[in-house]
Image (cartoon, rainbow, N blue to C red):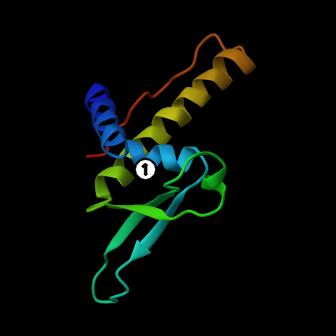
Amino acid sequence: MVKKKLGEIGTLFLKYNELYNNYKHGFRIAIITTGNPEIEDLCAATMWPIKKGLEANKAMNKAMIMRIENTEQEIQLCGFMCQVLHETAETFRLRVLEKKQEFKVVAFKDQT
């Protein structure tokens, strides 16, 4: 189950890699909508300059729009990773900080 979930995370990472890089390197992203209140149509937009070098500092004059159709899978996988990271931190606390010889660790709870 964990291997499958990590594979899903890897697939999403590759799908949204451009968006991730624009977030990581300068927070060049925005969330935009169609403006129609009857349609929930959120899109992620990434911004970057067309020109390189000194000219790039003058204006952000090009945008790439990336529609994220359904965020349910992303939300579920974020919950999974939070659980894994929490249990990893708990194991560290018990083994290293408290120097426990015996303890119980739950690596993954299937929530389906």
Local packing at callout 1 (Cα closer than 10 Å; few below 14, some 14-19, many 20+) is many
Quarter in which the N terminus is drawn: top left
* Residue 110 visible in the displayed image: no
Q: Amino acid at mark 1?
A: Leu
Residue 46 drawn above or below residue 112: below
Residue 104 drawn above or below residue 45: above
The percent position of residue 67, horizontal first and vertical second, equals: 30, 62
- At a point 74% along the width and 20% down the height, the residue shown is 97
The percent position of residue 4, horizontal first and vertical second, equals: 25, 30
* Residue 6 visible in the displayed image: yes
- At a point 57% along the width and 19% down the height, the residue shown is 103
- At a point 30% along the width and 58% down the height, the residue shown is 72
Label 1: element kind: helix
Instruction: Name the one closer to the observer, 96 or 11.
Output: 11
The percent position of residue 37, horizontal first and vertical second, equals: 34, 89
Residue 75 appears in which quarter of the rendering? bottom left
Instruction: Name the one closer to the observer, 12 or 34.
Output: 34
Report the residue that reaches farthest toward the bottom: 37
Report the residue that reaches farthest toward the right: 97
Instruction: Name the one closer to the observer, 57 or 20.
Output: 57
Q: How many marks?
A: 1
Residue 52 drawn above or below residue 72: above
Residue annotated with mark 1: 19
Report the residue that reaches farthest toward the top: 101
The percent position of residue 11, horizontal first and vertical second, equals: 28, 37
- At a point 33% along the width and 33% down the height, the residue shown is 10
Instruction: Name the one closer to the observer, 94 or 25.
Output: 25
